[in-house]
Amino acid sequence: MADGVKSAERAVALLELLASEPDGLPFGEICAVLGLPKSSAHALLSTLVRANFLRFEPTMRRYYVGVRAFEVGQAFIHGLDVAREAVPHLQSLREAVNETAQLAILEGVENVYVAKIEASHHLKLASDVGLRLPAHATALGKVLLSGLSDDEVMARFSGRPLEQFTDKTITTVEGLLDQLGQVRLLGFSLDEGEHTPGVYCTAVPIRDHRETVIAAMSVSVPVVRNSPEARLNILESLKREAGRLSNRLGCPGEAA
């Protein structure tokens, strides 16, 4: 049992070492860095190569992380349910600002609510998990669209009119692209009554291990509670909880 544990620890150390070396390492350097006897190192490397957790390049005589290690990592990422993972962060957000906190993902040109925590106020946003709204007219949607390239945004909206809901709704793809550029620059989006009159919404991105925008988190406030102090508190709280959730999903950088 002790030998088995030692072998497992050495295998993990090997994987961690090579995961940090995108250019790979030769056999002698692996032994030197990990302090492994050559016989033990050879046996472990051979086993991991056969199992495709490592890859050996005979021309360069170097070892690299293999495809199986990638597949295992992907299984972890895919197993994370972003909506489930978001719930405690939405709860913390609601406690910090006492307003409705929501999470949405992008499907086509619509944002779909996948999680929501209600405010305690009687006056609050009427929305439900599963509800779809046009992405061009919401803060959540603009954050999600900002994760796409301009070419992808134009392709998705090709031949589709941008429906107008209020006099503040963006109605042209050119105007939408201008706003998406600002969202990318600032790191957040606003909806000042673009979809629903009298409702102010702030949204920020949720990123995964590739730093890709995979969801968006928002807080919605009736205009009667939309003071400058409230807006600042909401934005700071959103950034904090979105950062923590992104960190939980593998996004580089330390959580706030």
Image: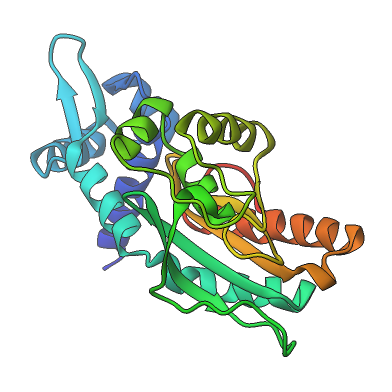
Residue 21: horizontal and vertical position, in percent? 39, 26
In the rendered image, which quarter contains the C terminus?
bottom right
Residue 186: horizontal and vertical position, in percent? 69, 36
In the rendered image, which quarter contains the N terminus?
bottom left
- Quarter residue 25 falls in: top left
As rendered, which of 168 and 25 lies closer to the eye? 168
Q: Is residue 168 above or below residue 179?
A: below
Q: Is residue 91 above or below residue 143?
A: below
- Quarter residue 159 falls in: top left
As rendered, which of 122 and 81 lies closer to the eye? 122
| Horizontal side of residue 233 vs 16, given as left or right | right
- Quarter residue 50 falls in: top left
Residue 182: horizontal and vertical position, in percent? 64, 32
Residue 208 visible, this angle: no
Which residue sits at x=52%, y=69%?
86
| Horizontal side of residue 162 vs 240, given as left or right | left
Residue 167: horizontal and vertical position, in percent? 63, 51
Q: State the residue lying farthest toward the top.
A: 59
Residue 76 visible, this angle: yes
As rendered, which of 215 and 20 lies closer to the eye? 215
Which residue sits at x=55%, y=35%?
180
Q: How is the image coloured?
A: rainbow
Which residue sits at x=61%, y=43%?
253
